[in-house]
Amino acid sequence: MPFDYSRLAATCAVDSPENAITLPPQAYGSDDLYADEVDQIFKRGWIPLCRLEQLGVPGSYYSIDILGMPLVVTRDRNGEVRVLSRNCTHRWMEVCSGAGTAGVLQCPYHLWSFGLDGHLAGAPEMKQSAGFERKDYALKQFRHEVWKGFVFVNIDGHATSVAEQYAALEPIVDPYDFENYQTVEQTEWGICDWDWKIMVDNFMECYHHMGPHRGSLEEQFPAALSYTGEVGEYFTTMWSQQADGYPADPPFLSPGAPTLSPEHSHKSLIFIAYPLLQIAMGPGYFYWLKVLPMGAGKIDLYLDICMSPAALAAPGLDARRSELIKMICDIHREDLDVCAAVQRAIKSGVTATGRLSHLERPLWEFYRYLGRQLGILGNTADLASAG
């Protein structure tokens, strides 16, 4: 059955958070909608790939697949970062996998080799091929930018800069010394059978603390104390406030940068930089979800954990790091259970939209973003056959 864009438009067009409704359930499993998301959101936007510290020295590389495209992020011998295709320009075998350091990236099929700047360094037995010039067969390079320690890629190459899109977000994150946090753990959660938008929905509200997290977060960070923060065209923020009477203890809330206010010691910042950078952070840590869409109702999921310079320098690092990783991963498992359950409900055939709480305002902001990017905000009567 073709996707009904008029129902999606009705959600995105709600012009006040007080009247907000959910997306239609079919939006989380439509191949038609996913194809439009790929073309109009993911390829046109900035997708986070990795942190700079994961390319710590010249010769480093980090492989990642985006929208079915094998990419590699490299730091060449001059320290320059690039985002390249991993497909050999001979007969398309992938030239590397995983992460590490190397002098060149060598295709295992016919041993063509490429510098970490993408140039073709070697091509055995090609001298008899008329007109062959190595300069014509470099690895394809994609536009990238670095923001606050993250490497982003823009597939179509036409997006306004990351710095411009997230300019109003910078004053919110800068007091944390955000770009100098260091990755201390990378976790892989594999292929997950739910839509990327379900992951955003769950991440950007604390309303569910009273449900899945009632034994882990709700007492100290109750749903009722959470609130929407600053918002922009390309981002939405939310704050999870600590209940009175609790100390600002590690691993979540201390130690932090001297630029933070005392108020920061009793709350966590949660934000999404659209479309896919999802971060929860406090003075002593942040973690980010690397959500790689693989189709309607399917993602490949990673969670990387970083610690602040102040937390890394404080005594007892090993114990605090272990405690932080365990707590974040335990809470994340609680989230995954409900995300899977929601997608199962959608597959069962539920059709009705629901109403949103005031605690879910970030979802309303997200749906407005979807409407803008998909070009469906407007006259919903004309959209029944769109797509």
Image (tube, grey):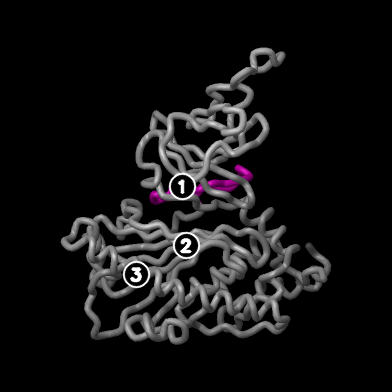
State which mark lies toward you, 1 or 2: 2
- From the viewer's perspective, tell me whether residue 258 is left or right of residue 226: left
- Amino acid, disc 2: Leu
**134 w.r.t. 181: above or below:** above
Residues tagged 2 and 3 counted as in contact (Cβ below 8 A)? no
Q: Quadrant of the N terminus?
A: bottom right
Which comes sooner in the sequence, label 2 or label 3?
A: 2
Image disc number at residue 326: 3
User: Visible in this render: residue 234?
Assistant: no
Residue 91 pos. (x, y %): 67, 32
- Amino acid, disc 3: Lys
Residue at mark 1 to residue at mark 2: CA–CA distance = 14 Å
Q: Which residues are magenta?
A: 146-164
Q: Quadrant of residue 33?
A: bottom right
Query: Would you name the residue on which mark 2 appears?
Result: 289
State which mark lies toward you, 2 or 3: 3
User: Visible in this render: residue 338?
Assistant: yes
Residue 88 pos. (x, y %): 61, 33
- In the image, 98 versus 145, the foreground residue is 98
Residue 176 pos. (x, y %): 31, 60
Looking at the rendered structure, the secondary structure element under dot 3 is helix
Image disc number at residue 322: none
Which comes sooner in the sequence, label 1 or label 3?
A: 1
- Amino acid, disc 1: Val
Query: Would you name the residue on which mark 1 appears?
Result: 151
